[in-house]
Amino acid sequence: MKSLFLALLLAVSAQAASADDPLSGRDLVKMAERKITSIDTATLLQRLKKHPNLLLVDVRMPDEVRRMGGTIDAPGNVVIPRGWLEFRIRQYALDADTPIVVYCGANIRSPLAALTLRQMGYRNVVNYADGFIGWKRVGLPVKAP
């Protein structure tokens, strides 16, 4: 675990050291998006049908889940706030091949979460880029908080 954080810190530090200004959060998200796979709503629906054991990880904060009206109503959906992901994911995914889809409200934290899970050794991780807002916008089922 320490080596994962050290590698990420060194990568960010190396990039920041070569630029005049520090990296922004948006810069980090763009970097993560180049290293992960993202899917849309149609693809997520297909995966939910194909993989009944799919782990759907909502990385929003609990108060945000409440404010936004809930989570995606699908089997295997869990809320693990982004700040706790590295420490709580093994409660739900012991196998490195567990199919995992991460999402947040609007594709800001979930690319970082997907990259982190990949760096932790999970091999079957994708980011749901439409996020909860996209899911809700098309009228798909939502589970109240």
Image: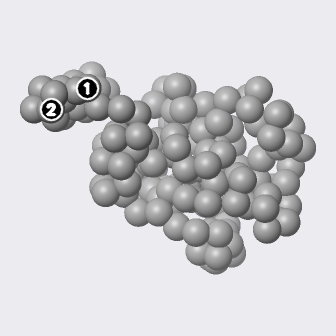
Left or right of 141, for residue 53: left
Which one is nearer the viewer's eye here, 70 or 105? 105
Q: Quadrant of the N terminus?
A: top left
* Residue position marked by numbered label 1 in the rendering: 22
Which one is nearer the viewer's eye here, 37 or 130? 130
Q: Position of residue 95 (x, y in %)?
A: 45, 50
Residue at image location 68% in from the left, 72% down from the top: 45
Quadrant hosting residue 79: top right
Circle 2: element type:
loop
Q: Is residue 7 visible?
A: no
Dots 2, 1 in contact, CB < 8 A: yes
Q: Is residue 62 visible?
A: yes
Left or right of 17, for residue 64: right
Q: Position of residue 118 (x, y in %)?
A: 36, 48
Q: Which mark is residue 19?
A: 2
Residue at image location 86% in from the left, 37% down from the top: 145
Residue at image location 79% in from the left, 68% down from the top: 138
